[in-house]
Amino acid sequence: MALRSRAGAAGLPPAYARLHQAFAWDVPEFFNIAHACCGRWAADPEHAARTAIVCAGVGAAPDRPYCYGELHAQALRLTQLLHAQGVRAGDRVALVLPQCFETALAYMAVLHMGAIAVPLSLLFGPEALAFRLHDSGAVVALVDAQALDAVHALRAQCPGLRCVLGVGSVPGGSGSPADLHWAQALAGAPAQAPAVPAPVTRADDPAILIYTSGTTGNPKGALLPQRALLGNLSGFICSQNWFGFDGGANARSDAVFWSPADWAWTGGLMDALLPTLYFGCTIVAHAARFEPLAALQLMARCGVTHTFLFPTALKAMRRAAPGTAAAGRGSGTRRHAKCSVQRQYGLRLQALMSAGEALGDAVFAYCEQELGVTPNEMFGQTEINYIVGNCARLWPPKPGSMGMAYPGHRVAVLNEDGTECATDAIGEVALHRLDVHGAPDPIFFLGYWNNDAATRAKYRGDWCLTGDLARRDAQGYLWYQGRADDVFKSSGYRIGPGEIENCLLKHPDVANVAVVPKPDAERGALVKAYVVLSPDALARCAGNALALARLHAQLTQELQDQVRGQLAPYEYPKEIAYVDALPMTTTGKVQRRVLRLQEEKLALRKN
């Protein structure tokens, strides 16, 4: 199957075109994630002693490294313990855990058995936890101490949950929210488990059940197969500038990865933890809440070479550590000597991937000028992760672009009738079941747990729909336009919020922004922007209400003129509201839907 865009293959960067034509997946019939990420390394005496996990100390606590041999040995003990609790292949085991060694260990043990890991965030409240535990039918839950009381309180709603294993908790027993205590239970489990043979899992066997929230209704459980990790790797390698290799076919193991992304989410699990271990490298675990300056210090201390930082994290870094960008800022101040953040902190970054929202030109430039690395923006979903993105080492990223299809994936931008869009026309991003050579693409999820109707709705023939809109330029780069339900029409014009938000973020007084439609009887909708001011802008007002009002009036005019001058006249925000913060998901994405519904309610009240 030829790799072509509407512009033809001639428009593609040569290195990109060559890579796609040569690339093919080798998916064996039998494959096990835990063996690929841990067991095979532990079996090699030289590699068994290499560091797999570094648990970064919080406060005065020292960093604690764990080698591959230790990870595998402890996983065998946990496998024996889970087997004793009745866990068998295909059973669901919930993991309510933070970034720590025990979490990596839990994944290895559960996947080693052929059971299904159900990652659940510590940020979930009781209702969210209860739904997922009940819907998945989890039989055992491994729960961090800070979530034990919440899980204990909802056990009556989860009759299938037979055992709660407390991690970092007081010993289990009568009166305890945990049935078993992690340290005590593992100490009593034998290192070898001859009675618990690891099932020979097939590549298509289920491995991970991750719940993803949509715009309406209950969250859906996306069931990922063992092979999904293999389908994930081409995008991971490219987005990390050939992670784990020396530029050719020779593997290396001196890469150190860290991301603040929760290991309970796709971004932390499939974009960080599992692929790092697959290549036998080191990943840093840090359970503390993300703080921009602490993150820079952590990356320097641990020698982090590769990272995934979502846009909100990078924006926070840019505000907290502006580096050269702050030199000479403000009237009457003494100009400081130029010093990039990279030099200031001694960063050793070789690659930086970002995803979730478009970075925007200002943040893109910050990464290059201050962090010393060109960011590779990426796009994917829980169901089909790592399908589109950039690779600064092989093809030049365009600031603001999602990039192009990663090796092997057949990606298209489709019209509503299922045909491919013309160049620069907006359509829905979709992935074909078959790769560019006509073989099955291993990245695909198996379906939604107990929800066949939702699974069918995800497809149009052999195309898996993402619900995200983009346009493809003449060179084959995709440009994100927003969720399908984020795009709206004003006076007959189809408007995507992404491009407008990117334009507004270029203003130094804007820290964050969201664009939504405001219902209008004459035009259908008006463009409205919600703006969060930068710390510098707020500092200039010094808490003075009159000064703040003047700033709002001046900035509104400047922002409207900026969009008029750089985009189309119909795209400028007719109304701008200034807010302290935007509604965000737990994964750092702006919830435009919340603001859109807010505008709709206000319009109904007025009418």
Image (tube, rainbow, N blue to C red):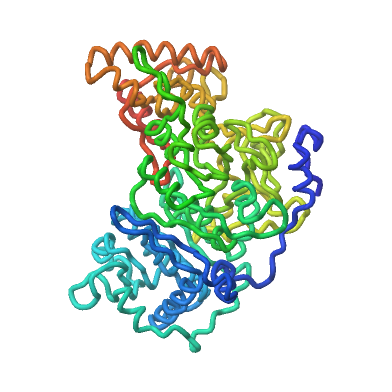
Quarter of the image with the C terminus is top left
Q: Nearer the viewer, residue 583 or 313?
A: 313
Q: Is residue 520 at least partly visible in the picture?
A: yes
Give the quadrant of residue 433.
Answer: bottom right
Query: x, y (%) of residue 567?
Result: 56, 17
Determine whether, in the image, residue 273 is placed left or right of residue 511.
Answer: right
Q: How many marks?
A: 0
Q: Nearer the viewer, residue 495 or 282?
A: 282
Residue 336 lies, with reference to residue 6, above or below; the image says above
Query: x, y (%) of residue 329?
Result: 40, 19
Q: Is residue 487 at least partly visible in the picture?
A: no
Residue drawn where x is 75% and y is 56% of the image:
24
Residue drawn where x is 30% and y is 78% of the image:
184
Residue extending farthest to the left is 175
Residue extending farthest to the bottom is 195
Determine whether, in the image, residue 172 is placed left or right of residue 590.
Answer: left
Residue 415 lies, with reference to residue 271, above or below; the image says above
Give the quadrant of residue 341.
Answer: top left
Query: x, y (%) of residue 235?
Result: 63, 50
Query: x, y (%) of residue 370?
Result: 49, 33
Determine whether, in the image, residue 395 is placed left or right of residue 511.
Answer: right
Residue 139 lies, with reference to residue 299, above or below; the image says below
Residue drawn where x is 40% and y is 45% of the image:
297
